[in-house]
Every structure is written in C-alpha cells, then in structure tokens.
Image (tube, rainbow, N blue to C red):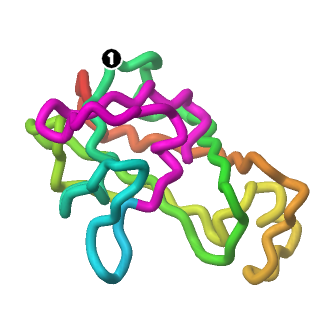
C-alpha cells in the first residue's frame, strides 16, 4: 500500500460499516478474487470494494501542487513481478469515485533506483521493503479539495 505521501487513516463508508474493525491491516486485504467479493474477519466486501476498500475519504493531510515533483512510496506484503500505476479521480462522489485517470506508471513495481540499474522485470529484490519513485504532477491538473 502507499506509504508516501502518508496514507489516510481508514474508516468505513457508512453504508458498509458493519461494526467490524477497520484497522490499517484492512488496506492489505484482497477484497476481490475470481469468484467475486471476499469475506475477511467477518466483513463481507461488496462489488465496489476494489476502489478504496470501502473506506471513506478522510481529511487530506498533505497538499500536492500541480507542476511539482512528489515522491511516491509503497510497500508490499510480498514482492511480485508486474507493473504499478498511480491514478487520480476528480469525481464529485468522493466517497465512491468511479472515474480515474493514470498519471504515472512504475515499471516492475520496484524502486526507481532498482529500475535504473537494469532490473530484469522478473525478480524484485527482497531486501528492498519500501519502493519510491519521483512523480512530476502534470501542470494542467486543476485544483481540487478531495482528489
């Protein structure tokens, strides 16, 4: 999950609040598999859980500025091959946004220094637990209080 900028504290959206714990570990739970929404610790995820894990947005803790570079950091419970992407949404329904656009991609889902040193795309190094990549936020991004 994302570690930089700091992740917001998870809180259930009211319609999904079933009284189950909403601790930070929920950010790592797979919410969907090929059979559909999953059940974890007595919480049944919905068909919409793929986006935002049914967590409501919290008050932003950082302000990002279009045209500047922001360091994006993430961790994995287990390294795996594949690519990662950074998406942004300007939907007016900030509780359950449906429309996103890609603003960055991270080949190999590895730290920028690993990628720059001829990463083979197959075997992410286990000794790196936090991956970071600088991202230039496009200058054309409009201002938004909830994106």
- Position of 97 with respect to 82 (left or right) is left
Q: Mark 1 points at which residue?
A: 59
User: In percent of the image, x 44 and y 27: which residue is there?
Assistant: 8
The percent position of residue 4, horizontal first and vertical second, equals 60, 34
Q: Looking at the rendering, which quadrant does residue 32 occupy?
A: bottom left
View extreme (front): residue: 42
10 Å neighbourhood of mark 1: few (<14), some, or many (≥20)?
few
User: In percent of the image, x 38 and y 38: which residue is there?
Assistant: 139
The percent position of residue 132, horizontal first and vertical second, equals 70, 46
Is 14 magenta? The answer is yes
The percent position of residue 6, horizontal first and vertical second, equals 55, 27
Camera-side residue: 15 or 43?
43
Is 20 magenta? The answer is yes
User: In percent of the image, x 37 and y 75: which residue is there?
Assistant: 33
Camera-side residue: 96 or 32?
32
User: In percent of the image, x 53 and y 50: which residue is there?
Assistant: 28
- Position of 100 with respect to 84 (left or right) is left
Regarding residue 46, the answer to whether it shows in the image is yes
Q: In the rendered structure, which segment of residues is drawn in magenta?
A: 1-30
Height in image: 90 above or below 48? above
- Position of 138 with respect to 131 (left or right) is left
Q: Looking at the rendering, which quadrant does residue 22 occupy?
A: top left
Regarding residue 147, the answer to whether it shows in the image is no
């Amino acid at each position: 999950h994302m570690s930089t900028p700091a992740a917001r504290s998870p809180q259930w959206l009211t319609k999904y609040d079933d009284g189950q714990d909403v601790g930070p570990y929920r950010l790592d739970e797979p919410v969907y598999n090929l059979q559909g929404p999953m059940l974890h610790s007595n919480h049944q995820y919905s068909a919409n859980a793929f986006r935002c894990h049914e967590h409501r947005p919290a008050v932003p803790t950082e302000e990002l500025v279009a045209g500047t570079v922001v360091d994006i950091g993430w961790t994995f419970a287990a390294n795996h091959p594949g690519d990662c992407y950074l998406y942004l949404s300007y939907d007016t329904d900030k509780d359950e946004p449906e429309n996103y656009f890609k603003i960055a991609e991270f080949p190999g889902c590895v730290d920028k220094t690993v990628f720059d040193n001829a990463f083979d795309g197959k075997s992410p190094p286990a000794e790196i637990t936090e991956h970071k990549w600088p991202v230039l936020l496009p200058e054309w991004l409009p201002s938004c209080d909830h994106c």
